[in-house]
Amino acid sequence: MKANRLSEAIEKFVRATQMDTTNDRAFLYWGLTLGMQGRFDQAITKYKTVVNIDPENSNAYAYWGQALYELENYAEAIEILKKSLAVNPFNEEAYPILVRSYYELQDYTRAWDVVDKARAANVTLSSDLLNRLREARPEPEKTQN
């Protein structure tokens, strides 16, 4: 999206949220637009507003986690992404960011645990992500009970 289109979108979100301060979708898309501009701190404030309005909005937590990841705040991203998955264990947005966050912290065991949970939820992770993780630590063997 071109910069002027993003600015126009933000103006519309500002107007929408001024007319209805409980418009969680407007705040969510406002946050996404700020994220596209690399304004992650500002995006996080919008995602926080969304979860204050609707604590069950799993995507708001996932996008918040993504913004924290982009800010290289991996530990906090993990905590927020766990909230996303607690609300919706099938959230396809949250799993790859959570795996990457653990990867960045070199916590490969937990990264593989998240891969297992994603698979159990029928969430497909990119082969690039899985290959990077395999290069750092091979996939653990599954033990049978």
Image (cartoon, rainbow, N blue to C red):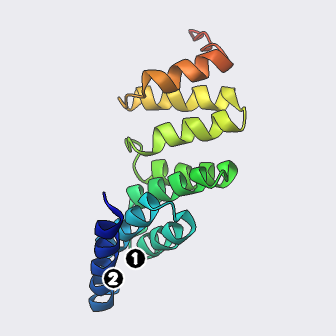
Nearer to me, 114 or 17 = 17
Q: Which residue is mark 1?
A: 53
Q: Which residue is mark 2?
A: 22
Residue at 61 percent of width and 48 percent of height: 78
Q: Is residue 88 left or right of residue 72?
A: left
Percent position of residue 53, x then y: 40, 76
Q: Is residue 41 left or right of residue 109?
A: left
Nearer to me, 30 or 98 = 30
Quadrant where the C terminus is found in the figure: top right
Q: Where 125 sits versus 137, above or below?
A: below
Q: Furthest-bottom residue in view?
A: 19
Q: Where 124 sits versus 94, above or below?
A: above
Q: Furthest-right residue in view?
A: 106
Q: Is residue 130 left or right of residue 9?
A: right
Percent position of residue 61, x then y: 47, 58
Residue at 52 percent of width and 42 percent of height: 97
Query: Is disc 2 surrounded by few (<14), some (14 to 19) or many (20+) residues within 10 Å?
Result: some
Of labels 1 and 2, earlier in sequence is 2
Visible in this render: residue 56? no
Visible in this render: residue 65? yes
Residue at 38 percent of width and 41 percent of height: 92
Residue 41 image-quadrant placement: bottom right
Question: Under tag 1, what secondary structure?
Answer: helix
